[in-house]
Amino acid sequence: MVALFVILFVVLLLGIDLIIQARSKQYPIMAVAPKAVASARDSLRIPKSVFFHPGHTWARLQDGDALEIGVDDFVQKALGGVDNVQLPSIGQFVRQGDPVITLGNKGKRVTLVAPASGYVRSINRDAIENPGMVSENPYRDGWLMMMDPEELSSSLSVLRVAEGAVSWIKEEVKRFRDFLNSSAAQPALVGDAMLDGGVPMDGVLGNLDEQHLQQFEQEFLR
């Protein structure tokens, strides 16, 4: 009787094991390494249709006679997201390189320059009321303003696009890592949010004091 019970128990276990194996093949469980998670989180989006300014703003031609303006993925990730946006007034003339866009997150602020010259036609009020849109997709719903450009050919000549933008952002990431690792940037202030693998960790600028945040502005956003 005991032997029969043991046999039945073994058969039951084998049956359960076969069921588990069958379900595993049908719905495979994929393990994601921590490094892969970090890589996905810190990857930088670089659309091919966007012209990038060295100060980490961008411009995109719209309807042949207007420029859509925003900030790039690099700066919003380094800031750790966006909870406040300040923009110039509609009708205001801004010149390429003028500081006109201010982003804030958890009390930290950075000011970025206009990627081109022209008159502000409109601003994205949805992004002002819901700044998280800039973090979710700075190149689509998170655009900031529309501009009627002046001296367009001159403005575009200093911008990067397509493969040139990719090469540039790679150099910027490397330069940013060197900035954080330098004695001037006081690595102790950065703590556990140091770079690994060449991409900025979310919110790393939030760990810098005001002096070094201003230094970042001068070296990367001007």
Image (tube, rainbow, N blue to C red):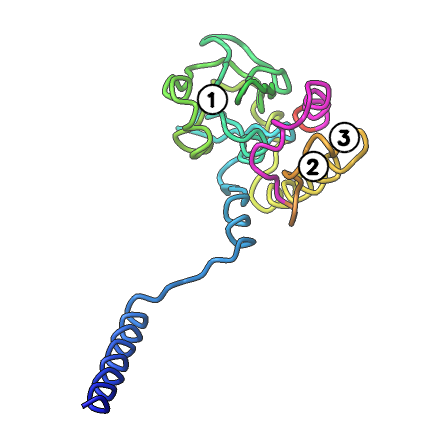
Instruction: Tell me the mark number nearer the camera, choosing from 2 and 1.
Output: 1
Task: Tell me which segment is drawn in magenta.
Answer: 199-219
Q: Pick out the residue farthest to the right.
A: 183
**Which residue lies at the image location 65% right of the left edge and 25% below the top edge?**
221
On screen, residue 100 versus residue 24, left or right, reads right
Q: Which amino acid, by three-letter code, is at mark 2? A: Phe
For label 3, the SS is: loop
Image location (x, y in percent) of residue 114: 58, 20
Q: Is residue 216 magenta?
A: yes
Q: State the SS at label 2.
A: helix
Mark 3, Cα crowd under 10 Å, few <14 / some 14-19 / many 20+, is: some
The vertical placement of 143 against 199, above or below, is: above
Residue assigned mark 1: 83
- Whether tag 3 and tag 2 are in contact, CB under 8 A, the answer is no
Residue tagged 3: 186
Foreground residue, 208 or 67?
208
Residue plotted at (63% across, 38% down): 193
Camera-near label (1 vs 3) is: 3
User: Could you tell me what secondary structure mostly forms the magenta stretch?
Assistant: helix
Picture layout, residue 10 above or below residue 82 = below
